[in-house]
Image: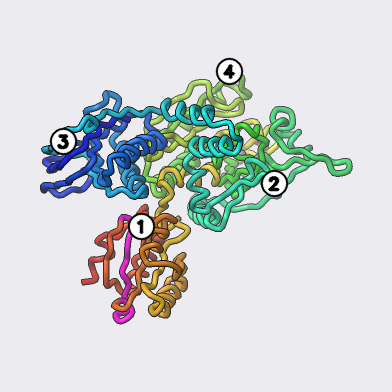
Amino acid sequence: MRALQLHVDSIEYEPVGVEGRVFEEADRRRYRVEEAIVLFTSVERDDTPEVASEMLRQVAEFMERIGVKRLLIYPYAHLSPELARPEKALEVLRRMEVEARSMGLEVYRAPFGWNKRFTLSVKGHPLAEQLRVVTREDVLSRREARAEGAPRQEAVQVQERAAAREEREPLHIRLGRELDVFSVNENVGSGLILFHPNGAIIREELIRLIREVNRRLGFREVWTPHLFRSTLWQRTGHYETFRDRMFLFRIGDEEYVLKPMNCPGHAMIYASVTRSYRDLPVKLSEFGTVYRNEQPGELTGLLRVRSITQDDGHVFARPDQVEQVVREILDASFEVLERVLGAPVHVNLSTRPEKHIGTKELWDVAESDLKAALESVGIGYEVKHGEGAFYGPKIDVDVEDSMGRRWQCSTIQLDFFMPERLGLEYVDQDGTRKRPVMIHRAILGSLERFTGLLLEHYNGRLPVWLAPVQAVVLPVKSAHSWYAERVLRTLLDVGIRAELWEEGTLEKRIREAHRMRASFVLIAGQAEAESNTVSVRDHEGKVVRGIAVEEFVRWIEGLVKRRERNVGSVDESLTTGLR
Ligand SMILES: [Zn+2]
């Protein structure tokens, strides 16, 4: 990230015309800011949230030194040849604005995506004009310097190391702690995630969504135990190839395995009755928690864990059904990812590797089925030659988050091997026994990873339907508590996740609600109690007064029901239709 930092008597700017396809709403009028630091900022391709935080830290330190409280963040593309994509740049700038405000600065931001006319009056002192460059390497070496250069006293050293660790910590771990979503406890074990009530809410909402999708796709939900005898894993071949990553133990004469995947259980359900060609495709789904013994060094937050809950599903299909089944799953997964994240996706098709089972003809048909499915949903994809699993080709869907990082979510994996190993069959039209194709699929991938993605993508401020706290009701004074309680009850009655906070000054409670990422703050004072209304304060600080309680309830219920991506903004849909 590069920024030109100017200490100004004043700056005036005026949005003149929109520059590109990504731009913010802005009025074409003159804006004036006085006695401020202006930060002309170019967000670069490799910038991470940590880079932006480091830039702000440096700027804030300087501002403190010279006693300036006012900061104008000004998008400025002309400082770097390596600019980030506009979507990412805008997201980074928005986050800087929020973060700077949380540092107690008075923050302004010029709109993104506009040609702007500006005039400046820069102060004359030696430090009034400075160029700042912060890269990922700077962030890393600063951490190292902090860790190494720590004074000898052990206590201080420990503190410094903790600080350095905190900085190195992925964003979702910090958010997970601050928002009370999850934790890891060494007495429980590394990589074994404890979901707190807030985390369990997010998980439950995701499960509810996928259940609806599964039902639509014709999946039937099953449940299988966490533990299978190792003889089953010997039959599938995992005992041989996957053994060092499985949790095995012996009870008497028998050996058991904590399941590292759900597939063999589903295969056993398939095999429990004779299947005719008319019964296929058989589609089974499960929110199945599996256990994999990852190396402790590889475990970071929700990304690599040892207990993983997949939104798993298996289809047992005839070869002539594969294309359609895959197409339906692809459609559903694009729809889900778009609805939940609204982020770009990248699709990969991994084809036959050198070491594989099955004939070349079998692979060719399978690969062309996957291609046909991809083409019929009309999505661009990249072919990864030779990167399929030895037992079949696959499609992966990666999501690009608001910071430009990629997360693997959906997978659709064809498998010729497991039906063979487990002797799965169906009776075909001519009475002969045939092998079904097994298709492994997940839409979100793992609920743990997806929760991490959500936290980072939305910077902790989740869409209302996913937010653990959807509304906080704040009585202005204790005299209004009775009314606030009535509002609370109305919300709880229709299933809105609402809380009532009475302790502390109103201002402090508002700040805390904002910090905890409550979607909306409802203020209940004298005027509200008299008119049976609330004042709705959204996450950007916009306040709309005089909203009838029933009206608000209807509106927020709609947001939740439609699973809109609204992260806590009041818009016309609330305010129109009222007056
Ligand atoms: Zn599977």
- Is residue 391 found left or right of 456 in the rendered image? right
Numbered disc 4: secondary structure: loop
The residue depicted at 42 percent of the width and 59 percent of the height is 512
State how far apart marks 1 and 4 are (Cα): 51 Å
- The magenta-colored residue range is 528-540
Q: Is residue 123 visible?
A: yes
The residue depicted at 49 percent of the width and 34 percent of the height is 396
Numbered disc 1: secondary structure: loop
Numbered disc 3: secondary structure: strand
Q: Is residue 217 above or below residue 91?
A: below
| Residue 481, image quadrant | bottom left
Q: Which mark is residue 354?
A: 4
Check mark 1 vs ligand 1: CB closer than 8 Å? yes or no.
no
Q: Is residue 533 above or below residue 306?
A: below
- Taking depth in this image into account, of 430 and 290 the one nearest to the observer is 290
Label 3 CA crowd tier, 10 Å (few <14, some 14–19, many 20+) = some
Foreground tag (4 vs 2): 2
Foreground tag (1 vs 4): 1
Residue designated by label 1: 568
Q: Within the magenta stretch, is there residue 223? A: no
Foreground tag (3 vs 1): 3
- Is residue 572 found left or right of 254 in the rendered image? left
The residue depicted at 27 percent of the width and 31 percent of the height is 3
